[in-house]
Image (cartoon, rainbow, N blue to C red):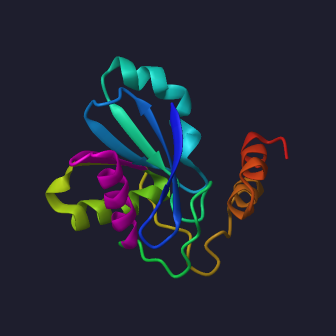
Amino acid sequence: MIDRMLELPDGRTLAFTEIGSSGAPAALYSHGAPGWRLELATLDEAFDEVGVRVLTPDRPGYGASTLQPGRSTAAWADDVAALGDHLGVDRFAVMRLSSGGLYAVACSAALGERVCGAVIAAGNTDMSWPDASDGSLQSELDVMAADDEDVAVAAQAGTA
């Protein structure tokens, strides 16, 4: 696994990992909420064995990626394109989980033929509307509210 940071054209930081087989066909995975770039890290060898390169960026405001106030879901496609350009990845599939599903749709629509396929598992919307967290587990809210990566990891592991 390689864990890196990329400075985006607007000066924000995009944190991402690369797991699996370097140089192989690429898939871009986006976490749900809560979640972050390291949630697939334990699958590094499995993706390597099947010959897939998986890029796992933190969405804005998650993990070590810079918050982007007022962002639109469609703006995520610009970040994904910048990551692909930086890594020399011209085409890739997108995989999304839960609230990341909406971002797969945005990438597929905005990036056209650059996206060769999309998988959405348990698709859900982002948590940006009033009262969106009603009924959520307190442990999930603690992770989403954490302003420090170590705090978020501890909260997600239940050790906070």
- Give the left or right position of residue 21, taking residue 5 as reference: left
Give above or below for 47 relative to 100: above
Between 18 and 33, the one lying in front of the other is 18
- Residue 50 in the image: state x and y as whole percent: 32, 21
Give above or below for 116 relative to 21: below
Count of marks, rendered view: 0
- Residue 30 in the image: state x and y as whole percent: 45, 51
- Identified at 68% across, 64% down, the residue is 135
- Residue 147 in the image: state x and y as whole percent: 74, 62
Would you say residue 131 sits in the magenta stretch?
Answer: no
- Residue 100 in the image: state x and y as whole percent: 45, 57
Q: Tell me where the magenta segment starts and ends, as one range.
A: 75-96
Residue closest to the far top: 49
Is residue 26 in view?
yes
Residue closest to the far left: 113
- Identified at 37% across, 54% down, the residue is 83
Between 35 and 65, the one lying in front of the other is 65
Is residue 121 in view?
no
- Identified at 59% across, 69% down, the residue is 67
Give above or below for 138 relative to 91: below
- Give the left or right position of residue 50, taking residue 12 as reference: left
- Identified at 57% across, 40% down, the residue is 38
Please tell me in which quadrant of the rendered image residue 62 appears: bottom right
Residue closest to the far right: 160
